[in-house]
Image: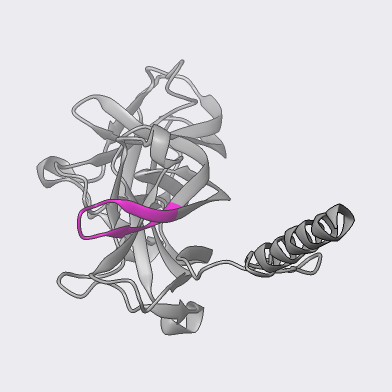
Amino acid sequence: MKKKLLFVVLLVFIISLFIGYSQVPKKKIVKPGIRIHKAQCRIIGIRPVSQTPAKVFFKVEYFIPTTYRGAYFIGAYIPNASAQSSKFSYNPAGRRPNGVPKGSKTYSDNIRFDVQYIGVDPMTTNTIEVAIYNSSSQNVCSKVFNWSKTWKRFKIDGIKRIFTSQERVKVQVQYYIDPTYTGPCNIGAYIPNKVSPSSKFAFVPAGGAAGVPKGQVHFRDNVVVDIRYTGTTAYTSRTIEMVIFRSGRNFETSVINWGQRWSNEVY
């Protein structure tokens, strides 16, 4: 009798264990190499499509789930969000109240943001962090890209002689001055360079009181620097240093090979 009772108790215990196990939710088996996750926003890539020495327009590829509510925008930080430089301003993709389109967007959708350099001296950067953020300016996702550029608001591209004599030369200048820079700028020259300029020359800089035109300026725009020799004996120059300046401050200089024999002698 005792053995029969013990057998019944043991059978009931085994049945209860089986019932309890069958009620435990089964763990989903995921095959190696397959990840299951909820859809979330992401920056896929960026591509510069237009640029000047001081400004770059980027197209962006991204994904924002259509289930996300509210407006979203795409902006940038240089070199990154945690160490953002104050020498840049940004024009994000997306306008209030709607923001950028949601879903999966490629370069062909032509969604752009731009970055403007507002510093004065040249600056080289190697990274840019692009972020998707909401209407409360909270970043939802971001990605850091390796992207190098030397930013300049002033740049001398070259010079071209339009008049040459033994005592006088006129040169046209091809250059860039950021149109957003306020205040007049002039363009002058030093021979042989600004570190050790010769006292045997007089220069009439381009621009006058109003300054030279800004933006990308070509030789055909006829911005001219007038160089005159004032020495009493012959002089041979090998270089000339062109300079963009304002009120005595040089913003950009460029040393150019320049062979010229100067003289005020009358033959």
What's the magenta region?
130-141
Q: Which of the 4 image quadrants contains residue 80? A: top left
Q: Report whether residue 88 is seen.
A: yes
Image quadrant where one finds the N terminus: bottom right
Q: How would you classify the magenta stretch by its main secondary structure?
A: strand
User: Taking 197 as reference, is 20 above or below it?
Assistant: below
| Residue most extreme to the front | 1
| Residue most extreme to the right | 3
User: Taking 80 as reference, is 46 above or below it?
Assistant: below
Q: Which residue is found at the position 48% from the left and 48% from the top?
A: 128
Q: Of residues 166 and 266, which is closer to you in this image?
A: 166
Q: How is the image coloured?
A: one colour
Q: Of residues 196 and 16, which is closer to you in this image?
A: 16
Q: Is residue 133 rendered magenta in the image?
A: yes
Q: Which of the 4 image quadrants contains residue 84? A: top left
Q: Is residue 132 rendered magenta in the image?
A: yes
Q: Position of residue 64 (x, y in %)?
A: 41, 72
Q: Of residues 256 and 180, which is closer to you in this image?
A: 180
